[in-house]
Image (cartoon, rainbow, N blue to C red):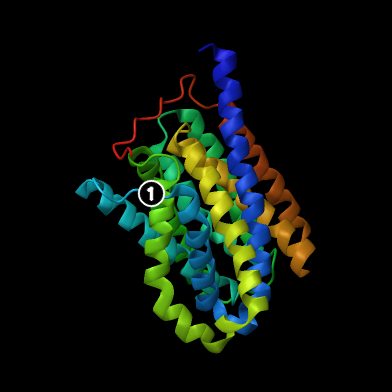
């Protein structure tokens, strides 16, 4: 493949990540509106449950012949999905969307530094980190400490999500691994979600909005990210995710009326610049996707 072909291919997969981010933050905005009816953990259950319901008939994964190592990977992926979403929604119940994602993205940023093998990657990660700090420093007013801790926990889970998603994409064909992981996540989150939401889970309008959140926040973005992670390095993907505070702040402003200061505007420009830099400084040779060991 020529250098130009590699660059265009990298940009194409980077665009998938960005599109997934936009869908995710729009879905998060809808989820916040449902909190008064089902609670944060009830929303997690609805999101993961409907994601599994959408993916299973599409992927129709074969369970026979899956190796133990692959089962451990996909089970870990499913549990991390449930944990990450739970901590994130608990943080959204206490702090604005833009602030929550700003804090959450620190996890992938740390991963980008650890996984990077080029000195230039440290520059882009550092630039994104400055933007994250600015966006969270006074841009949204006083932040609830418990909400901040929940967001930080979600960021740690997000870093593990990146690693497990990459491995799941390599071990399973197409969306099989994601469908299985979503099912495991739905089972794990069910007790907490049912207790939190109660009889609201029987209301048609709640179920309809829950399905919309699942499609926007999980099914579409996770599917796009799973495809992208087969071709992008972990450090490039993690730095691209620094766009999340920008998309979250804009979604919070437009859809939820959550305002931020001029410092937030500067921070948005910094994280966008860092993300563009990460794409341009990607390695000249993309890793070839490994043949999945679960074929059917």
Label 1: element kind: loop
Residue 145, percent across and down? 53, 76
* Residue shown at 64% from the left, 78% from the top: 204
Residue shown at the point (53%, 71%) measured from the top left = 46
Would residue 275 appear left or right of 45 to someone viewing this image? Answer: right
Which of 202/144 is in front? 202
Q: Is residue 145 visible?
A: no
Please identify the residue farthest to the left as the structure is shown.
68
Q: Position of residue 133 (x, y in %)?
A: 59, 55
Q: Quadrant of the C terminus?
A: top left
Q: Residue at x 40, y 62 (%)?
A: 183
Q: Please provide percent x and percent y for residue 48.
A: 49, 65
Q: Does residue 73 appear left or right of residue 116 in this picture?
A: left
Q: Is residue 104 visible?
A: yes
- The residue under label 1 is 61
Check the image and name the residue furthest to the bottom. Answer: 199
């Amino acid at each position: 493949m020529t250098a130009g072909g590699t660059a265009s291919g990298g940009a194409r997969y980077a665009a998938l990540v960005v599109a997934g981010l936009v869908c995710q933050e729009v879905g998060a905005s809808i989820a916040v509106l449902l909190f008064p009816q089902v609670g944060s953990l009830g929303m997690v259950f609805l999101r993961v449950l409907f994601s599994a319901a959408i993916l299973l008939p599409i992927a129709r994964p074969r369970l026979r012949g899956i190796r133990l190592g692959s089962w451990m990977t996909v089970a870990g992926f499913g549990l991390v999905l449930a944990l990450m979403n739970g901590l994130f929604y608990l943080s959204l119940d206490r702090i604005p969307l833009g602030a929550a994602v700003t804090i959450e993205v620190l996890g992938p940023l740390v991963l980008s530094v650890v996984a990077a093998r080029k000195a230039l990657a440290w520059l882009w990660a550092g630039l994104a980190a400055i933007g994250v700090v600015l966006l969270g420093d006074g841009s949204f007013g006083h932040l609830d400490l418990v909400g901040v801790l929940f967001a930080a926990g979600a960021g740690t889970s997000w870093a593990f999500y990146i690693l497990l998603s990459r491995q799941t994409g390599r071990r399973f064909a197409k969306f099989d691994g994601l469908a299985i992981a979503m099912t495991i996540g739905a089972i794990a989150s069910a007790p907490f979600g049912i207790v939190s939401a109660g009889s609201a889970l029987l209301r048609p309008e709640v179920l309809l909005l829950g399905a919309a959140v699942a499609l926007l926040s999980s099914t579409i973005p996770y599917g796009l990210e799973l495809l992208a992670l087969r071709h992008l390095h972990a450090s490039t993907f993690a730095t691209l995710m620094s766009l999340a505070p920008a998309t979250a702040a804009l979604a919070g402003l437009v859809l939820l009326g959550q305002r931020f200061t001029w410092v937030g505007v500067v921070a948005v420009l910094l994280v966008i610049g860092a993300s563009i830099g990460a794409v341009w400084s990607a390695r000249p040779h993309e890793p070839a996707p490994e043949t999945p060991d679960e074929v059917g």
